[in-house]
Amino acid sequence: MFKDIAIAALRENGYKITKPREWIVEYLDGNKNHPTALEIFDDIRKSDKSISFATVYNTLDTLVKANIINEITIDSQSSRYDPDTSNHVHFLCEKCKKVIDIHSDKVKPILESMPGKVSGFDIIVRGECDSCIKKS
Ligand SMILES: [Zn+2]
Ligand SMILES: [Zn+2]
């Protein structure tokens, strides 16, 4: 499903569906790790595939503009990409740097309480995740 929508969006924006672009879409499908462009690039290359960073970057940029994926800025160094565009909050573990999706009905009343129409939001809660707490 995600793959079809993403491929259609790339086509609409004048991109030919090449293997590398398909790999990026497949990589993101159901991905909950909120990877950076560099991580996507590295992971795809690790499996012996030839892809350029420019392809990764431009494909992500197009998918963001087409609202197929979300770009989230958690740290100032680099954007992360999230194929889950539903309303959710991110919990960042400051120890292991893991970003955990929090889907909660409690977000809706917050959005509804805004003085106008909400077009998007970034809520990042910082702390220490359960598995890091257990380790220490
Ligand atoms: Zn952690
Ligand atoms: Zn997310």
Image (spheres, rainbow, N blue to C red):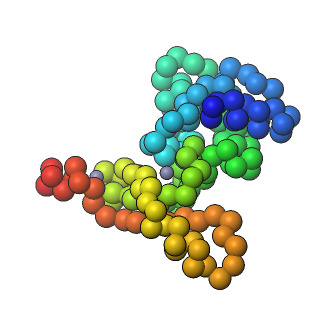
Residue 122 visible to the viewer: yes
* Residue 122 drawn above or below residue 64: below
- Name the residue: 52% across, 72% down: 109
Q: Position of residue 113 (x, y in %)?
A: 57, 79
The answer to which image quadrant residue 56 occupies is: top right
Q: Position of residue 85 (x, y in %)?
A: 59, 50
Q: Position of residue 1 (x, y in %)?
A: 63, 31
- Name the residue: 52% across, 62% down: 76
Q: Position of residue 124 (x, y in %)?
A: 45, 64
Left or right position of 12 against 107: right
* Residue nearer the viewer, 40 or 100: 100
- Name the residue: 74% across, 47% down: 66
- Name the residue: 50% across, 43% down: 35
Residue 52 visible to the viewer: no
Q: Which quadrant is home to the C terminus? A: bottom left
The answer to which image quadrant residue 54 occupies is: top right
